[in-house]
Image (spheres, coloured by chain):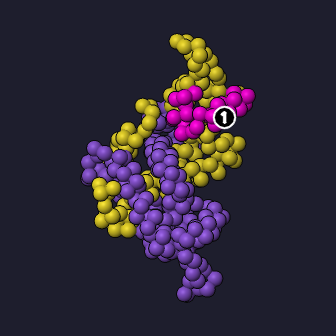
Chain colours: A purple, B yellow
Amino acid sequence: MEKFPLENDLVARGLSAYAPYLMNRITHRYNQTLGTTMAEAGLSTIKMRVVCALAAKGSLTVNDLSVYAVAEQSTMSRTLEQMAREGLVDRAMDESDSRVRVISLTQAGHDIYTRIWPAMAEAEARMFDGIDPADRAQLLETLDGMLRNIRLNPL
Amino acid sequence: MEKFPLENDLVARGLSAYAPYLMNRITHRYNQTLGTTMAEAGLSTIKMRVVCALAAKGSLTVNDLSVYAVAEQSTMSRTLEQMAREGLVDRAMDESDSRVRVISLTQAGHDIYTRIWPAMAEAEARMFDGIDPADRAQLLETLDGMLRNIRLNPL
């Protein structure tokens, strides 16, 4: 306990000097704003994340997709079943391990990605409005280091 | 749509160059880890946030508390009723407007803050392990600018 004395706590520093507070505020606002846009396009937040992760990564196992899309595995399995029925993803056996399923986007899934990307890019652009490109690059590097520090999964 | 061409999209850049992705991963992990610790202490995530916001800010209206604690107002009202019954917060009439309720921590609420702060400080310290103090300071400044860009509430 003595390692983290109250001398430098939230009362002394203020909330805004506590990085998790700022990040929770920002991600909440981002998720709310984009969630509304996606709902209008018939896409839940988790489906949006699945579409994006598969667009960026090609194909992924259910496990890895859960990590990238920040979702519990049970939620992910249900979501993927729905998305398969909707014709957005394909499920295939892994060539090296027949017990593992590999998920990828169908053409319709790719088309949805192309349709939703502008809203995501706009949400990102609004965040960085007026922020120096060097500070933005540094932010990404620091965030990447932070994720490496705390992630449970090596991805 | 042309403002955000696919040339610089997630496929071209990779997920890790999209700041909201990194922040969602980090905050999810932080919230999960701390949520488990707090649950063991009998505190939900929202109660933890209420305790911290009030510790940092002194007293707050329900509206402002909802913003700082990143919660819907209806959830916040319910949570505050519980916390009042548990003896953690006091609710008083605002001196300048009798329709407005102002919330503050009781001594028991302050004691809980003192008890949970070490876990929060530790979660923060793990995030920044090995990260240059200058990069950490720059991160806070950039995050603060990002929140100003996208927040709906002036707080």
Magenta span main SS: helix
Queried whether the magenta region covers residue B83, the answer comes back as yes
Q: Quadrant of the N terminus of chain B?
A: bottom left
Left or right of A93 on screen, residue B126:
left
The segment highlighted magenta reads B62-86
Who is closer to the viewer here, A57 or B54?
A: A57
Q: Which residue corresponds to the image point at 52% horizontal and 29% vertical from the top-left? A: B64
Queried whether the magenta region covers residue B87, the answer comes back as no
Residue B107 x, y percent position in the rendering:
64, 25
Q: Which residue corresponds to the image point at 38% horizontal and 38% vertical from the top-left? A: B148
- From this view, report whether residue B77 is shown above or below residue A84: above
Asked if one can make out residue A3 in the rendered structure from this viewpoint, the answer is: no
Residue B146 x, y percent position in the rendering:
37, 44
Who is closer to the viewer here, A45 or A14?
A: A45
Three-letter code for the amino acid on which mark 1 is drawn = Thr
Which chain is indicated by disc 1?
Answer: B
- Determine the secondary structure under disc 1: helix
